[in-house]
Image (cartoon, helix red, strand yellow):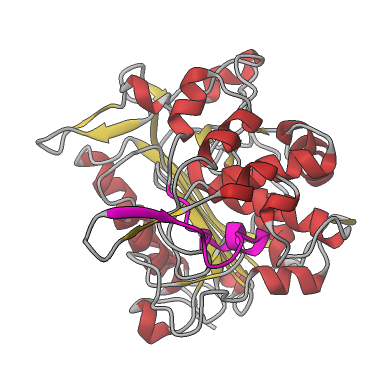
Amino acid sequence: MQRGQTSTLSQWPMELTTPEEVGMDSRRLDVVARLMDSWIQERRIAGGIVLAARRGLIAYRRVFGWADIEREIPMRDDTLFRLYSMTKPITCVATLMLYEECHFLLDDPVKWYMPDFANVRVRVKGADGADELVRPCRDITIHDLLTHTAGLGYDLVWEARKQGWTTEEFVRRVAQIPLYFHPGEKWHYSSAHDVLGRLIEVLSGQSLNVFFEERIFRPLGMTDTFFHVPPEKKSRLATLYKHDAEGKLIVQTEEDLLIDPPPPGASDFFSGGGGLIASTSDYLRFCQMLLNDGAWDGTRLLSRKTVELMRTDHLPPGHPPIQPYKFGYGLGVSVLRSLGEKQGLGSVGEFGWGGAACTEAWIDPQEELITLVMLQLRPSSPQYFTKKIKHAVYQAIAD
């Protein structure tokens, strides 16, 4: 597929218009194509999809390069992508849906719902410099899980998938690992959203995949989002790439990454922190629901006030921006606190998150803008490509 071509394989949730119709400049948006074309020609990426939607219309949608270079499979607009951590905002929306139903309060101790966390300890340095385990200054709360301030590390997720643990078994083992710091002290990226996945199961009485399907995917019309790719759709899954020591683009084949999602029934571990696969059009539906303050196409998943809470900065007072992103952090999403702090284009209040394979979503209520970048590459610095695309989109706003 040549640059600029757009197929109609996916069921897009909104109409395609000209950039000028929604206050953007077509010529300035050509910067996106220049970047993507140059990266493909230099063999830095295989291909991808870039989309910008504004005021409820798709202003820019381009499909670039290859889903699989070796097999000469072109990228298509219905290509499926491993979301990795772009799963996290979906898990947090599910958690907040149960919050709205009054199953819990945000400051409730996690141990009330998952007793394995009743006896957690914190690893600290003693007076003699040796490690010792102490009781946490307070219990881990659900708010701590939503904000990555629980003191957890990013432990055992790959092991859980490899060993075929249930989500319950995963949480039991995570609760036995000493905390990195006392709950609420600071932000530290962690497996907290995988723990939230188990909380959803406990409170709803459903497995996480069933809850997602019944409560989020089906109401939003997300027919191409799942933990396990159905056999009839597996040919649409893009190949995952990486760079070798010389910077050459090669297929990511490490067994421990488990890059191919397991077939249905292979594992009961549904990773709320990074297990979903989705199409671009499906994730656009999810983002538009959040931009619409929790509603989409006659279906309301969250109230306006809950989405407002989700996209508010929740870092402890005086906490520096999370690195290397230079953002604040809400409930499962980054939050831009100030342009000076970010040192880049954007809007105060913009929120979103990305994944380890260079997928990223930004939602800007001020500009009524959604930007999606969908690649399948695990580089040493995932933000390099997505940050440049983001700047290219923002500099094209003309009104």
Q: Residue at x 57, y 32 (%)?
A: 170
Using residue 159 as the reference point, say whether residue 131 is left or right of it.
left
State the image coordinates of residue 212 (x, y, percent, origin top left).
Answer: 75, 39
- Residue 75 visible in the picture: no
Q: Residue at x 47, y 64 (%)?
A: 182
Residue 309 vs 278, above or below: the answer is below
Using residue 207 as the reference point, say whether residue 353 is left or right of it.
left
State the image coordinates of residue 112 (x, y, percent, origin top left).
Answer: 75, 52
- Residue 34 visible in the picture: yes
Quarter containing the N terminus: top left
- Asked whether 120 or 333 is in front, the reply is 120
Residue reaching furthest front?
128
State the image coordinates of residue 303 (x, y, percent, origin top left).
Answer: 83, 67
Using residue 390 as the reference point, say whether residue 273 is left or right of it.
right
Query: Residue 240's image quarter?
Result: top left
Total count of labels: 0
State the image coordinates of residue 41 (x, y, percent, origin top left).
Answer: 23, 40
Q: Residue at x 9, y 36 (%)?
A: 246
| Residue 152 among magenta residues | yes
Quarter containing the C terminus: bottom right
Region rendered in magenta: 131-153
